[in-house]
Amino acid sequence: MHKPKYQTGFGNEFATESVEGALPVGRNSPQKAPLGLYSEQFSGTAFTVPRVHNKRTWTYRIRPSVLHKPFRQYDGKLFGSTPFDEIPTSPNQLRWDPLPIPTEATDFVDGITTIAGNGDLFSQVGVGIHIYAFNKGMGDRYFYNADGEMLFVPEKGRIGFFTELGYLQAGAGEVVCIPRGLKFKIEPHPDDKELRGYVCENYGQQFRLPDLGPIGANGLANPRDFKTPVAWYEDKDGPHQIVAKFGGNLWACETDHSPLDVVAWHGNYAPYLYDLTKFNTIGSISFDHPDPSIFTVLTSPSGEPGVANCDFVIFPDRWLVAEDTFRPPWYHRNTMSEYMGLIYGQYDAKEEGFVPGGGSLHNQMSAHGPDLDAFEKASNSSLQPQKLSGTLAFMFESRYIIRPTKFAMDCAELQHEYSEVWQGLKKNFKV
C-alpha cells in the first residue's frame, strides 16, 4: 500500500512539489511553467469572498483538466440527491441496522447508497447523507463531486484516497474531507476485503473549525492535528474513466490518461484528514450535562449566525464526573435535525439496537433520549467518576429537516419497532 506523507494544519497556505523545481517561485502562472507543466487554478470559493474564507489552489500538472471526452449520464443506482419527495417525510424516530457489504465485486462509485438529505444542491444549502459499502478498488476509474464536499467517516476497513493533490489513508476513528470538485479514486487496504462507512455530502458552506468562545484559544479539534497530503502524481497513459456527480446525477467520460497528474501545487483548497482520538473533549466538572455542541469537530455555517447548515459532532472516550446529575444525554426535542451513526463501541444513551455501521434519525422536534435500560441504570447508579472508553458515535446535525430516501424507508434494515425502546418508561410522579 502506498505510504502517506502529510503537512499539518487546518486551512494553511501549503506549498509542495513531488519533483524538485516543479513549483514556480514568485508567480502563479508563468509564461512557461516549469518542466513543461500546465498551470491551472482550482477555486473552491468565488474570487471575491473575504480573504479569511477564500479558498483556491494553484496546480502544476502534466495535462490540463479539459482534456477528456464529453460526459454521458451514468446509472447512479442508489446514489442520489435532494429533494427526496417520493414519500412524505415522517416525524417518527427512525433507526437502521448496518447495510450489508456486497457479495459481488463492487467499487466505491457503485457501492454508495443515499440514506437521507435536505436542502437544495442547486442553491448550495443542505447535505446528503450516504453509506458506502464496497469490496474492490476503483482501478483506472476516478470520481469527483461538483455538488458538494464529501466528509468520509470510515466504520469498517482502511481506505486509501488517491487524489489530485496527494494520497491519504484512513480507517475507523479518522475522517477525511474531499473538497468539492477534487478528482480521486479509492482503494482498499490490501488486508481489508470489506469496507463500509458514512459520507456527509455538504452542499453548503465548507466545513470549518467552530468558534471556541469562552473555551479560549485551545480545545476541541486543534488546527495542528489536521493533515493534508504532500504532492503526489501518476503519469499513466491508456483508457481511464472519470465519473462526476453534477446536478444530482452521475455522469461519466473517457480520457486517455490518469487525471491524478498534479506534480506540484500551492494553496489552501485541499483534502485533509483528522484523527478523532486527538479531539480535546470538553465536559462538566461540577454538575449537569452540557449541550452536545461542546463535541463539535467541524461546522458548515448557514446564513444565520450560530445556526449550522451542518455540524459534525462526535461522542468519544471521556470521563463522566458530574455530581447529582443524570449523566447520559437528556431527553430532548430539538429545532435542529440529528442523524447519528456509530463507528465502534456502545453509545451511552442506547443500551442495545444501535450498532456500528447503523444509523438513527431524530428529526426537527421529534422527541428522543435514553432508552428504558439506559434511564434506569443512570438514574440509580452510584455517581463515582466513570471513564467511557472504547466508544465513538457521531452526529450530522442540520437546521433543515432531514428527509429519508424511499430506499431508506423501504429497506430491510429499517427497525420498525425502534419506538418500543421508550414504551417501558413509566410514570414516577408522586406528590
Image: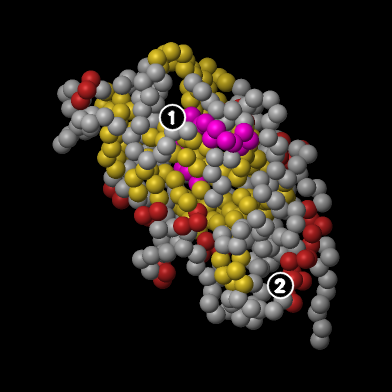
Pick whichever of labels 2 and 1 is earlier in the sequence.
1
Q: Is residue 349 left or right of residue 202?
A: right
List x then y, in percent, for residue 93: 73, 53
Left or right of 427, for residue 105? left
Q: Is residue 241 visible?
A: yes
Q: Residue at x 31, y 37 (%)?
A: 57
Expressed as whole percent of the image width and height from the top left, the position of residue 83 reads 61, 37
| Cα separation between marks 2 and 1 | 48 Å
State how the image is colored: secondary structure
Name the foreground residue: 4 vs 93: 4
Residue at the bottom extreme, as displayed: 431
Going by the numbered disc 1, the residue's amino acid type is Lys
Instruction: Give the number of callouts.
Output: 2
Please identify the quadrant where the C terminus is shown: bottom right
Determine whether, in the image, residue 14 is placed left or right of residue 203.
Answer: left
- Tell me if I can see residue 311 in this picture: no
Query: Are there few (<14), some (14-19), or many (20+) residues within 10 Å of tag 2?
Result: some
Q: Does the magenta stretch include residue 328?
A: no
- Seen at 75% across and 57% down, the residue is 352
Please say if 296 is above or below 285.
above
- The residue tagged 1 is 183
Query: Quick check: 70 above or below 326?
Result: above
Q: Residue at x 80, y 48 (%)?
A: 416
Read off the residue under disc 2.
378
**Relative image position of residue 117 (x, y in whole percent):** 60, 42
| Rendered position, 8 above or below 408 | below
Magenta stretch, residue numbers: 175-195
Q: Nearer the viewer, residue 128 or 48?
A: 128
Give the side of residue 365 with respect to residue 240, left or right.
Answer: right
Q: In which quarter of the image is residue 389?
A: bottom right
Residue 213 vs residue 230, the one in the foreground: 230
Give 419 or 356, whichever is nearer the viewer.
356
